Image (cartoon, rainbow, N blue to C red):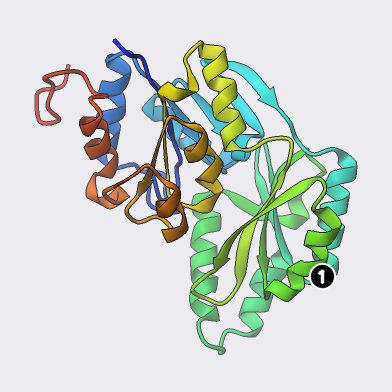
Amino acid sequence: MRRRVIFLDIDGTLTEAGKNEPPQSALWAIEQARKAGHFVFLCTGRNYDMLSPLLQYGFDGVIGSAGGYIECRGEVLYDCPMTRRQTELVMTVLAGNGVFRTVECMEGAFTDEGFKTFLQEHAAEGRNSELLRWREQIEQSLHILPMREYRGQPVYKVVFMSPSMEALARPQEALREEFDFCIHGEDPYGFINGEIINRQFDKGKAVEKVCAHLGIPVADAIAFGDSMNDRQMLETAGLGICMANGSEQLKELADEICPAVWEDGIRAAFGKYCLTVPSVSMYSPME
């Protein structure tokens, strides 16, 4: 049997964005793939605290913080938080240019209270009240705490919300040697959102590290994603699959497009590439 390593992004791929409950069809497919002898890893931008609710479903390992932390069967393969100097530099440059920050640590994430204050003060303007409600829901479901509770823990990644591309110009110039800006684009509410990631790692390099540890060629890796922060992962794996609900840019780069997360896309792709136990149907009695 050709043993494969499967890498699954979470938000927009395994679950709907900001949620922690995968479709039953995806859970069935993952279970059957592991029974068939394949390895299944989470590969996400989420920090360990944010991804931990999904560990109950059974995985062979996790890649968290966009590649900054890798764990395989309980063994830590890679752990690369920012240095203190880098953290202070990123935090200072973003704040000095009016860009709102969420810092992601191993055991939690912490966000600028100023972002919600800004939205509250401008709630009457267009869709800011909608964004405020969405932000509060995300913070609750992903356990994002206010910045006042941050106590200097090591930071793996910083997520930003910028009022404009112009506000990002100086941070990009000041940080470009050490950090990559993964800009997701303008959200429905008019803000520019994205992530600042250490150039020492990315999801693609993490895929290579896991495959090398398991002794499986990268050509036998299959990666699933939905946004441009999954680009390196899809380009590195032998087969890169984008969800139908994914970004148009990523679809152009992917080898294939599968149905959306809410249309049982994971199960469909696992079936197409024969990753589940042969002759087992999702509707057969479970063992």
Q: Is residue 75 above or below residue 229?
A: above
Residue 168 visible in this rendered orientation of the protein: yes
Residue in the picture at 36% in, 14% down: 3
Instruction: Count all numbered tags in the image, as a single digit.
Output: 1
Give the farthest residue toward the bottom: 124
**219 or 141: which is nearer to us?**
219
Q: Is residue 208 above or below residue 113?
A: above
Residue 52 screen position, x and y as percent? 51, 34
Q: Is residue 263 above or below residue 168?
A: above
**209 or 136: which is nearer to us?**
209
Residue 25 visible in this rendered orientation of the protein: no
Residue in the picture at 62% in, 39% down: 65
User: For the residue labelled by badge 1, is the local secondary structure a helix, a strand or a loop?
Assistant: loop
Residue in the picture at 72% in, 70% down: 114
Quadrant where the C terminus sits is top left
Residue in the picture at 25% in, 22% down: 32
Residue 123 falls in image quadrant? bottom right
Kindly identify the amino acid type of the residue bearing the numbered disc 1: Asn
Quadrant where the N terminus sits is top left
Image side of residue 279 versus residue 211, left or right: left
Residue 38 screen position, x and y as percent? 35, 18
Residue 224 screen position, x and y as percent? 40, 39
Q: Which residue is mark 1?
A: 97
Image side of residue 282 versus residue 116, left or right: left
